[in-house]
Amino acid sequence: MVLLFFKILGGEASKNFARSDISFGFGWLGDPPGFSIREGIDLQPNSGIRALAVGGLNTLRVAFSGIVAATLLGTVIGVARLSKNFIVSKLASFYIETIRNVPLLLQMFFWQVLLQSRSSLTEESVGTKLFDVSNKGIASTWVFPSTGFWPWLLIMIGGYYLARKVARTRRKYQEDTGEDGHPGLFGFLTILGVAIVGWFVHPLLSFLSILWDGIGNLIGAVPAASVSLLIAGLAVAVAAIWIKRFLDTKRTPAGLGKLTDDDIFRMIFAGVSALVIVWIAFKVGGAIINKPDGTDASVAAVLRDGLANIFYWFGDKFTGEAGSPLAISRPVVEVRGTGGFIQYGTTGILATVAFASVWIAVTLYTAAFIAEIIRGGILAVAKGQTEASQALGLRRSQYLRLIVLPQAFRIILPPLGNQYLNLAKNTSLGTALAFGEIVAVGSTLMNQTGQSLPIVLVWMAFYLTLSLSLSGVVNYYNRRMALVER
Amino acid sequence: MSVANNKDVIICEGVKKWFGDFQALKGVNATVKEQEVVVVIGPSGSGKSTFIRCINRLEAHQEGTIIVDGIELTNDVRNIDKIRSEVGMVFQQFNLFPHLTILDNIALAPLWVRKQPRGEVEEEAMALLERVGIPEQADKFPGQLSGGQQQRVAIARALAMKPKIMLFDEPTSALDPEMIKEVLDVMKELARSGMTMIVVTHEMGFAREVADRVLFFDYGLVVEEGTPDHFFENPQHDRTKLFLSQIL
């Protein structure tokens, strides 16, 4: 029925498209988009797909930095609202009630106007700064990866696992002997030690570049035709495994339990999703696009080369050159070009007015909701738990760490995930501020090419992927934290 | 078994407590001797729960003195900590930690408050579970146990701190009738072992069988006290007579 419905819908749509001269295709993915983007990894993208990638990355950038900042701020405000200090708790309430009752778009405009009304850069402001706000945006000192950062990061990952092992040994010592083993302190010292030693010995890892290049060569050698086949096979395999595991959960000792319509629909949905991916893999994967260097290649080949290039790029970072892995970079205000424009230089980190407005607005807005979720989670831990802990003589810090946090976390997690999804989707309002995120870029592309339906499909696919990834992470932790009930 | 010559471990004199405008305790005088089992009964709202919650400072009294094992309860946090480590408490709603296994529930306080080694703590926890009759539940979570089993775990958890005194705040009121007996059996065993106990309860059978002394609370005061025989057979006060006529 459902398939028939879509078939009729698709047929009607294509008839209407033909009548009103709207074409439907993906050729624009390879064509030059004919516009520039104000910020991102590439300001002059040479193909539609690259323009969308720039927009998508801008969305991800503001969404993830927003999620981190909103979580931190929301936690602080949520705890502040529970404070016994009258002024602190009233301030937190005031913040929450004000921020969440003003439309988000209005708040974005507010920050944009506020930033734009800052004075512009003048001759006097030329020089190196620590932190600077002007009508060009917010420039700040930042720490960037530098020589040997990637080998050092690899060492740090090893150091993290070592520190965990050390902390565990110390905790066991504490439990076995009853003496304080300071597991946290020992773990911290271990990772600090590894960081310092790794800072100087990272050139020793240069031999790994052979490994990364080897993997890159291996991927590059896969024929373009099999890339589509590989993606299609993977999709089918994942769907098959999912359906099998889903059926396993329905199996009782007496045999397969009765399946509800919902169960059957879920399995059909998984199967159809796999088939759609197969269709896209062959349809889009085989399409020929024009590469920046002027040659033609199939989308599948471009994807394959892109993946291989990641490993080549990684291999290039293992040069064995000595130097500090992290570099502090300070922003400068400089006179640029012959016209004598005064601008921020390329050092430090610069948030444009559009980026900063969107980021500040979604962070403050979501933090208000997160604060309420945190407060609710802490309050939802039953009062009896406090009394039982007190009666046993637990200290307040122990009570918070051992009793409240683990219980509050599992209450907080699902609604917190919702707020993350909301934040990610709310960044699309940035289009009203001409922030070059995926909706803004897509709208411009739509105007240029007239391909509205395919671009809407790309938007939907992008936000669906983003939402599913976020909720996947949240669900994973949720399952781990769930209470065992009867 | 006579406890008449034992020394007093809890001495309360003129204890008063207000919740806002409402006065819950109006000057309670009571003493409890070592190894004595005192049962507190009375109508709801009479202040009996508030009274035993004052003994380990879950509620702070505003006037009068409470001395537990020679230590006076004041706002001094060190005294509160000391008394709490000597006084165990069992609640009406069990208040087990739902995110910890039964064994971890019992082991938590000895591990973190007494800082005992884990091996020792777990051995003792298992011994306590044997004592309350459910060693096979050690690795389950509270949500998987029946009410009676949960309350027995709660008793084991309180005992794990090796308290000198145990407080029971209506331990059987939230239980299904068929589970009350298993909890009362554990409490009787505890009483026979010589534990000092204050029990707020509506189980008159338990009071008659186990109590050394019964305190009858009404309107925030101890209206009548005496041995179970005196109390049930020959009550003096009209309030006591009325109360007993309603429940017996």
Image: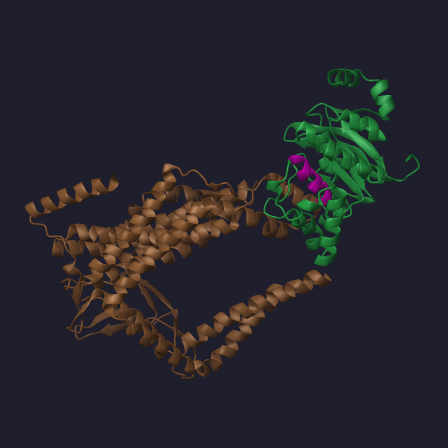
Answer left or right for A159 relative to A185. left
Q: In which quarter of the image is the C terminus of chain A?
A: top right
Does residue A387 lie above or below A480 as drawn?
A: above
Q: How many labels does the image show?
A: 0
Q: Is residue B59 visible?
A: no
Query: Whole-percent x and y of residue B58?
Result: 69, 40
Query: What residue do we see at 53% from left, 41% from top?
Result: A380
Query: What residue do we see at 39% from left, 73% from top?
Result: A145
Query: Whole-percent x and y of residue B219?
Result: 72, 23
Does residue B244 lie above or below A310 as drawn?
A: above
Query: Whole-percent x and y of residue A323?
Result: 42, 82
Does residue A24 lie above or below A31 as drawn?
A: above
Spot the brown chain and give its letter. A
Query: Whole-percent x and y of residue A84?
Result: 56, 44
Answer left or right for A244 relative to A193. left
In the image, B95 versus A254, the foreground residue is: A254
Q: In which quarter of the image is the N terminus of chain A?
A: top left
Q: What stretch is highlighted in magenta?
A: B147-157
Q: Can residue B7 be seen in this view?
A: yes
Q: Is residue B39 magenta?
A: no
- Residue at the limit of the structure toward the front, as seen here: A254
In the image, A303 versus B93, the foreground residue is: A303
Which tint was used for chain B? green
